Image (cartoon, grey):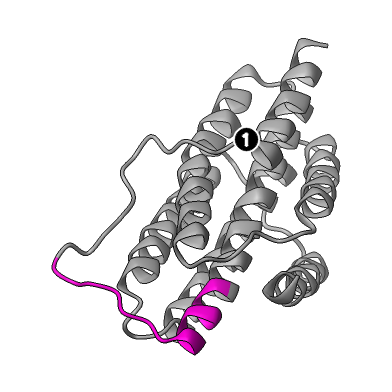
Amino acid sequence: MDRLIGAVDGALRTLFAAPRATRPCPVLPAEETHLGAQERHHAAALMRVNHVGEICAQALYSAQALATRSERLRRHFEQAAREETDHLAWTRDRLDELGARPSLLNPLWYAGAFAIGLVAGRLGDAVSLGFVVETERQVESHLQTHLERLPAGDHASRAIVVQMKQDEAGHAVAAQHEGALELPGPVKLMMRAAAKVMTTTAHYI
């Protein structure tokens, strides 16, 4: 019951409270960001998608921590979620700086990701960790695409995305070391399809 209450509290904090980062936001102090209106709009759409990804990360890790029976693995998921909170705070602050709003569908994204994480967790720790590995690999690839699509002069957003990409790769490696199971090809394809729906929708809504 205590863990369930904690999961509910985490959802409310993720969706409705201002996230607080434990690390300073990545910056390139020698570079200033100067964007035109069209560039600002484009960068905001990409950062909104990245913010949604962090909403989903909080939901996934919360659900997986709730589902596992391993205290050690629970601590692993909770630590990963705390690290992802930095990303959540950075992307939200960047949206504010760009004069943009987060996705209006964040509660829906959170609920869907939580359900997926709970199912993965119920299938066993190795499967749950395998889901983390594949998710982080796909996120890393997605972030690389954003680095290629962000305006060249948007140094602020690019610095954030670079750090996020490094952190996601680290989470995948950590999950592998914990004993992750390689997911079947069809499952990976379904995950990519679901991610495509989310990223396309969040770009606009």
Of 176 and 74, the residue lying toward us:
74
Amino acid found under the numbered disc labelled 1: Ala
The image shows residue 76, relative to residue 30, as above or below, that is above
Image location (x, y in percent) of residue 61 = 66, 39
Of 50 and 97, the residue lying toward us:
97
The number of numbered discs placed on residues in the rendered structure image is: 1
Q: For residue 2: magenta?
A: no
The residue pinned by badge 1 equals 17
Image location (x, y in percent) of residue 51 = 59, 58
Tell whether 47 sits left or right of 180: left
Q: Please, what secondary structure does the residue beneath circle 1 have?
A: loop
* Residue 177 in view (yes/no): no
Instruction: Quadrant for the N terminus, please.
Output: top right
Image location (x, y in percent) of residue 95 = 52, 61
Q: What stretch is highlighted in magenta?
A: 30-44
Q: Please tell me in which quadrant of the rendered image residue 192 appears.
A: bottom right
The image shows residue 4, relative to residue 47, as above or below, that is above
Q: Please tell me in which quadrant of the rendered image residue 109 appears.
A: bottom right
Of 132 and 151, the residue lying toward us:
151
Residue furthest to the left in view is 30
Check disc 1: other Cα within 10 Å, few if <14, some if 14-19, many if 20+. Answer: few
Q: For residue 42: magenta?
A: yes
